[in-house]
Image (cartoon, rainbow, N blue to C red):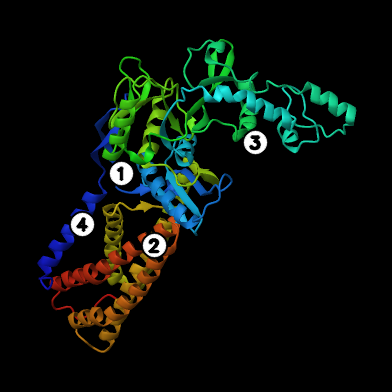
Amino acid sequence: MLSSLRNRMILIGVMILASIIYLVPRTETVRERDAQGIMQDVPRKRVPLKYGLDLQGGMHLALGLDTSAKKVADPAGAIELALTVLRKRIDEFGVSEPLIQKVGSDQIVVELPGLTDPERAKKVVESQAFLEFRLTDKTGGFEAAIPSMDKELARLGVKSTGAAPKANGVAALLTGDTGKKTGPDSAKAAADTVGASILAGLIHAPSDVGLSPMPGEYAVLETAYLRVDSLLFVPEVRRLWPRGVELKWSQAPMSIGTQQVRLLYALSDKAIVDGGHLIDAAAQIDPLSQRRTVSFTLDRAGGRVFGAETGRHVGDYMAILLNNKVEGQPPVIQSRIDQHGQIELGNRSLAEAQDLALTLKAGALPVPLKIIEDFQVGASLGQDSIRAGITAGVVGAILVVLIMIGYYRMAGVLAVIALGLYVLFTLAGLAAIQATLTLPGLAGLVLSVGIAVDANVLIFERIREELIAERSVRLAVEEGFKHAMNAIVDSNVSTVLTAMFLFQFGTGPVKGFAVTLIMGIAASMVTAVFVTKTFFLLWLQRRPTATTLSI
């Protein structure tokens, strides 16, 4: 089939047409959420070649495991799980062509090209998004235990105001001892001022600050929040918590009059269900209150447990915990809740609701992540890189054209025409596989131009040898392409193998270089061996009696 010149021209025409189709921008329909959080079809202009972080700007993050809170038994396994969770989150986040990959055994690199809100991205990446539903304690056990906790704090030397005696290390840590020495008289005077109502004076009933009474809910002034939190978690005090009860703080303080109040909740230490049973979550706006909500769907097993527990506790309060903090005030269970429910987010923005929904849907991180490296690439820097890369490519291509035409004359002209098609085929191939073009990728494209010309040089030199041996022009062309093929294949295969290793073991920019180089070598094989030979055959058909060749 390819022995026919007509069929060769048709195939080249088809490849050119297909390349143009791939490189022409077109409009596609994608599903996105509108301002009300409703999914709908939105037309988007599809760009044939997407730019990487170094060309269009964006954000680069290097993440590592945060082991400050707890020791990780299997760091490699935790990194793999975190990698899976982050990929789900970033895919939902809507960044075009993100890079998320493991580097070494304990780090993850995230690159987000074209990102316009870096702070929001950081929150999505770092968020634990661990969801739990727990009942509030209605026995009053915590309130009854406060006097015992105060006595224990008094024994430790913690005062209701002022500094604790130097003699006790725990008290010094909590109250900030000045380090002054105290004699027997001064120690006795300090002991006399130790209050027996330390926590009782800082933890208030909701009605004391103007809130409606709720079982298991307590109020602490925001100015005393950190002190109360540190006192409650002193090991000696922690042992006095009521059995089966855990204390959790609200996600954020609330304003009551001119004061800021942080709510403290006594909750069951066992969750009804957690985020492991979540299969879907979506941000919405309540049509009546206009408040942001996140609706959720549990799997069948979670729905059965949730339905049974909420059915038994109709009329009780249920707290919704996100990352060990209570989200909003616990609602009353009005009726049995099975697989579907919603989380009210009050006055939070729709973007925050959408971020919460996608992080819940993607799952909780197995271990908290911390940002090790963070930098942004400006869009102007990316444009400078594009201009510099294009300039380098154009200058290199012009030099190649001049050398080829000046040295090989008419044969060089045919090679230059084939080189133009090579660039077209390479860019179309990158667009077909939806590759992301990076600055190293541009370097790979320029390098592959030289490789494409190298194949033509091997062929032309072989044709020259055949002409010196007094072969006919047609036979010299056939023999030149035939005998140069082995050298062309060997050189290109070795280069492709090297590029494949770069792709397998390299990071994002190196992968971009490898992909462009491989695609360029494939296109060069087509143009140097097939297209250039077709041009020679077309020239020989027009000059069947030619005895010389301009080469």
In this orientation, does residue 94 appear? no
Give, as a three-letter code, the residue at label 2. Answer: Ala
User: Marks 2 and 1: in contact by CB < 8 Å?
Assistant: no
In this orientation, does residue 45 appear? yes
- Label 2 environment density (alpha carbons within 10 Å; few <14, some 14–19, many ≥20): many
Give residue 259's position: percent from left, percent from top. Answer: 59, 14
- Label 3 environment density (alpha carbons within 10 Å; few <14, some 14–19, many ≥20): some
Q: Is residue 535 above or below residue 222?
A: below
Q: Which mark is residue 271?
A: none
Mark-to-mark CA distance, 4 and 2: 24 Å
Mark-to-mark CA distance, 1 and 3: 63 Å
Instruction: Look at discs 4 and 1 and give the one toward the viewer.
Output: 1
Left or right for 223, reference 303: right
User: Marks 3 and 1: in contact by CB < 8 Å?
Assistant: no
> Which residue is at 48% across, 43% downward?
59
Residue designated by label 4: 16
**Nearer the observer, 409 or 296:** 296
Mark-to-mark CA distance, 4 and 1: 19 Å
Instruction: Look at discs 1 and 2 and give the one toward the viewer.
Output: 2
Instruction: Look at discs 3 and 2 and give the one toward the viewer.
Output: 3
Residue designated by label 2: 514
Mark-to-mark CA distance, 3 and 2: 60 Å
Q: SS class of the residue under badge 2?
A: helix
Q: Is residue 111 above or below residue 289?
A: below
Q: Quadrant of the C terminus?
A: bottom left
Mark-to-mark CA distance, 3 and 4: 78 Å
